Amino acid sequence: MTARVLPRLKLKSGFVRDMLHGHAVLGLSFAALIYVVCLSGTIVVFYFELRSWETPEVPVVQTVSPELVSSALEEAVTKGEDVEGLHIHLRFPREAYPRLTVEVEGGNGERRFWVARPEGGLVPSVEAPFTDFMSGLHVYLHQPGIAGSSIIGLSGILTIAALISGVLSHPRMFKDAFKLRWGGARRVQEADLHLRLGVWALPFHFIVSLTGALLGLAGLFVGVIAFAALDGDMEKLGPLFSPGQVVREGTAPAPLPDTARIFAAAAEAAPSSHITDIELDRPGTAGQTVAVTAVDPRALSYGDVYVFSGDGTLLQRSEMRALSAGQKMLHYISQLHFGWFGGWPVKLAYVLLGLALTVITVNGVSIWLAKKRAKGLPELLWERVWPCFVWSQPLGFAVCASLSLAGFGGDFFVPLWLGVTAAALLAGALWQSGKVGAWVRVLAGLALMGVVCFHALRYPAWQDGEAVLLINAVSIITALCIIIPPAYRGFLLRRPA
């Protein structure tokens, strides 16, 4: 007789039934919100690749030398001479976005953006409205203030609640983790897919939902803390979450920083790290400071910060291991949520697992609709409307991407996306046919194909071929996965059962 290693968890049938009911209520009530957040989040994993794909004409810089940094700083100071309280931020090239960007910010909040050329000199930065639209949709739903980010945080909490209730409502889900009844009844097939994707990727779903909730609600938490403990003074909370800035006296004119010496000092302080950012405060004065961010590829953080004087003297070091628990938590949750660590293997895993969570959200509603039909109580309106909503999202995204490539700004992308969604929902509500969702699906796939063709015509010779090839390949594969299933089933040519 084999000894039982783990005790069997026995749940009462009434408890399981209540959990299943709660799981269904949560999923049906917030499926649309969770779906949009999951789908946009999966796309935003390719944030830097999308920005490279959208702006391939921006000069590419693969290697940064002290001479190039010195030249960029000098020209940035010249271009910002009319800006009061000058602060210059250089962001170094990364694998997915090989550009040296320069941000010039004044004390009044005015910002100007430039990009360095590999041979030296700055050119105006090129906007990426579609990339900004997608990131804004995922981070704050394009809502003002902390309203949008709070809704995103709420969606993370709701997803966690749905995950927990889903586990508790299916006591056999771990035992049947590899049971997939494919090719039989559609409802059984969808249910098995729903449970298998939920089990196999459960740790990822939980981590991403938790970190998303924390990031989304961070602004609300910070505001409450500031109001309750610091009389509403938000600035006093800065030192609790980020290293304090070094403030030096001196407004007399002085030469710009010795970048070669600072590079050497940063390499000595962090030999296993590489520089990702340089921030120059009050350039050209005796009190100027240079903050260098160095990232260890093996660490799950945004990097260590070293502050130097203009002559290369180390004034302050803020290393990850010396940060407080709150500072470390902010570093960890941001990296864990977006998957911007560990290179391509991690990024690919985040995309596949993000798609799994998106599919779970979609077919959860489909399972409920199939159960209602099996009971003889079909929800005809929702059977038409839900697929239209699902496929209207990639359709709206593809339309916005095409207009961005055509040179349009992103000011009207939000109403355009909402308009495409509303048109699809209206078609599903008014068109008395089960084929309307399939037509919207095929239209979304064709629109994605059109984006790739439009990009090839718009940029026949790209500078950053890797990012362009990646995004175009992913778009084509996604379009084929969208179009082929309904075409294979002949869904567009016959009346569905």
Image (cartoon, helix red, strand yellow):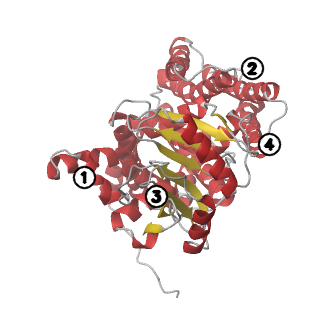
Amino acid type, callout 3: Ile
The mark lying in front, picked from 1 and 2, is: 1
Q: Confirm or deny contact between disc 2 and disc 3 (CB under 8 A).
A: no
Task: Please tell me how crowded label 2 is: few (under 14), some (14-19), or many (20+) other residues with Cα within 10 Å.
Answer: few
Q: Gap between marks 2 and 3, in whole Å?
A: 43 Å
Q: Secondary structure at mark 2?
A: loop
Name the residue tied to disc 4. Answer: 465
Name the residue tied to disc 3. Answer: 207
Q: Nearer the viewer, residue 218 or 195?
A: 218
Task: Judge whether 333 appears above or below 487 on screen.
Answer: below
Q: Gap between marks 1 and 2, in whole Å?
A: 65 Å
Name the residue tied to disc 1. Answer: 236
N-term-proximal mark, 1 vs 3: 3
The mark lying in front, picked from 4 and 3, is: 4
Q: Gap between marks 1 and 3, in whole Å?
A: 30 Å
Instruction: Give percent across and percent down for residue 460.
Output: 84, 30
N-term-proximal mark, 1 vs 2: 1
- The reply, left or right, for residue 41 in relation to residue 449 is left
The mark lying in front, picked from 1 and 4, is: 1
The circle drawn on residue 493 is 2
N-term-proximal mark, 2 vs 4: 4
Amino acid type, callout 1: Lys
Q: Gap between marks 2 and 4, in whole Å?
A: 40 Å
Amino acid type, callout 2: Leu
Q: Nearer the viewer, residue 266 or 429?
A: 266
Q: How many marks?
A: 4
Q: Confirm or deny contact between disc 4 and disc 3 (CB under 8 A).
A: no
- The reply, left or right, for residue 425 in relation to residue 123 is left
Q: Confirm or deny contact between disc 1 and disc 2 (CB under 8 A).
A: no
Q: Gap between marks 4 and 3, in whole Å?
A: 33 Å
Q: Residue at x 69, y 25 (%)?
A: 405
